[in-house]
Image: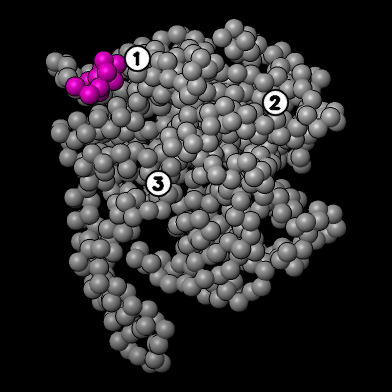
Amino acid sequence: MGNQQNSPILALQQQRLLLQMEYVAEKDAYRQQTEEMGLQRQVKRGDAWWPVKMGKSYYNSLNQLVVEVHRQGDEEIEHNFEFGRPVVFFRSQGGPMEGLGNPRGNSENPRISYFPFTGTVSFVDGDRMVVAVPDNGHLIDVQGAENVGIQLFFDETSYKMMFEALDRVIRGKGRLGYLRDLFYTPAMKAETFSFAALHFPYLNPTQEDAVNKVLRAKDVAIVHGPPGTGKTTTLVEAIYETLRRESQVLVCAQSNLAVDWISEKLVDRGVNVLRIGNPTRVNDKMLSFTYERRFEAHPDYDQLWAIRKAIRDLRNHRKRGDEKYHQKIERLKERATELELRINAQLFGEARVIACTLVGSANRLLEGQKFGTLFIDEAAQALEAACWIPIRKVSRVVLAGDHCQLPPTIKSFAALKAGLGKTLMERLVENHPEAVTLLKVQYRMNEEIMRFSSDWFYDNQVESAPEVKYRSILDLDIPMTWIDTSLFDLPEGEKVLFQEEFVGESFGRINKAEAELTLLALENYFKKIGKERILDERLDVGVISPYRAQVQYLRRLFKKRAFFKPYRNLISVNTVDGFQGQERDIILISLVRANDKGQIGFLRDLRRMNVAITRARMKVIILGDASTLTRHPFYKKLYDYIEAL
């Protein structure tokens, strides 16, 4: 037995080593990017804003010094700034606009010097960002400087939290130790309560099973939701029912976006949600349940603000030889702390759901708090170590997600190969199938779009709800088409090669002719449907490419093409990750890869392709060089499947 006892611990120690590799790889990549990659490329990748205009600075309701930053650059580019991410300010020695049009010459890489502190993104809304900075006088230098920019900094904190969580789990006793052993030991069975099944009239049978399984679980339950099967609906129902039995639950997800999504649905059900952190989509509804807004809306807040202001004034105007200075400061501080605790106790006392990201659950506001149940949404996209951060606070865990869709992002190839990419959800599905419910009815796609995904990824177990089975835009339309670029010339009479090009190291690949053809294919399809109907029914379109360079190229093309002007707000162009959890009437997928060697790079990660195809309600158009792609069994099968429709 001794050996058995150690195996979860050995596995977790192994994981800690892999996480260490990933940490080093990411830190290295960050350093390299910062030193070698031109500023323009950082801006293009969405990892930097430059130039920026510095706005006003003030103390926010959480008593942090914050400063507003406005992006002056190209608003076309989607950026990666979001709440909680660390940032640094820099000054560039080259002129602000030099080199933007001319990649040669040294203005492409103006010399950059960094200001000696890091900030944290508190808030982003379009081209305006609010950054919390240390209150140590450095901000004045930034505000007085020319040619200032801001870039994402390496996220040391998240790693620190993950390492800490793994260490705690490895040493874990009591409930934490029990969950650890259970999760890693197939022979142990997850314990359940037994009571008669509850009936929910607006859920289908598998959704109902899932909710009942969650309510009966003592240790763990897993809701496996393939695309379009109503995973969020089911999860919201499970949370709602759990709250009839518990006074408060913790709800987490990997990304801020996923936390917002589930919070919004819970608020719609009338649940009192307290969101720790700021939402990604900034509107009044989303903001109204954030901790920060609730804090400033509290009746005692004005008094607290006055005390904090008094403390700052005292510090700034300290008189020489003021004997009582320390006493005054201490008295005020005590009073402020007391008020803060009182406001917090009330906000946390009223909330039924505390919602935050996995890493956000380490927030000092949640220190020492315990919960009966933790719900983790999009659990298949989170590193296992991140899941352990909130698990330490709870006695049972419910995971929801789909390990056949997007995996966690991992930079270190070696760590990925050695198994860092294996999520806690995957581990549990393998070790404890008894705790899993697969949702089997999908409400999004035409049957023929769904059928391929169901066969390849879900053992053919997913079926279509009758109301969507035959949905289509045109009569006798074929729901999936593959336009094989290896057979094509563009109509201009010149021979265009549909070949991929490589744009810069880690920026990716681009296939210009295929991009042109993508627009042409959509234009032709739109002409068949007719302008009036597209606008009346607001038929929406997603254009997806796995490669970021292709996405940006496609965006520029759409902007220029007059034909698409009336449809501007119906068409979105993004990477697979950008469409996570979304759906559109029509989906076009530009696969980019076209070469003689049959190399398809990370298109080999089929889960991405599963996500791309299953975003569509009624029509999928795939553009790709079949001779390159069909050397891979998945794409061969997909191509043959579509040809046979």
**Picture residue at 73% right of the left edge, 64% below the top:** 97
Q: How many neighbours does mark 2 have within 10 angstroms: few (below 14), some (14-19), or many (20 or more)?
A: few
Q: Secondary structure at mark 1?
A: loop
Mark pair 1, 2: CA separation? 38 Å
Residue type at mark 1: give it. Pro
Residue 615 visible in the picture: no
Residue 108 is marked as none
Tell me the residue that label 1 is attached to: 466
Q: Residue 519: x percent and y percent?
A: 65, 34
Q: How many neighbours does mark 1 have within 10 angstroms: few (below 14), some (14-19), or many (20 or more)?
A: few
Residue nearer the viewer, 606 or 394: 606
Residue nearer the viewer, 517 or 356: 517
Circle nearer the N terminus (1, 3): 3
Residue 360 is marked as 3
Judged by depth in the image, the label closer to the viewer, 1 or 2, is 1
Judged by depth in the image, the label closer to the viewer, 1 or 3, is 1
Q: Secondary structure at mark 2?
A: helix
What span is in magenta? 201-212
Tell me the residue that label 2 is attached to: 601
Q: Main secondary structure of the magenta part?
A: helix
**Picture residue at 57% right of the left edge, 74% below the top:** 143
Residue type at mark 3: give it. Gly
Mark pair 1, 3: CA separation? 41 Å
Q: Quadrant of residue 287?
A: bottom left
| Relative side of 346 to 519, left or right | left
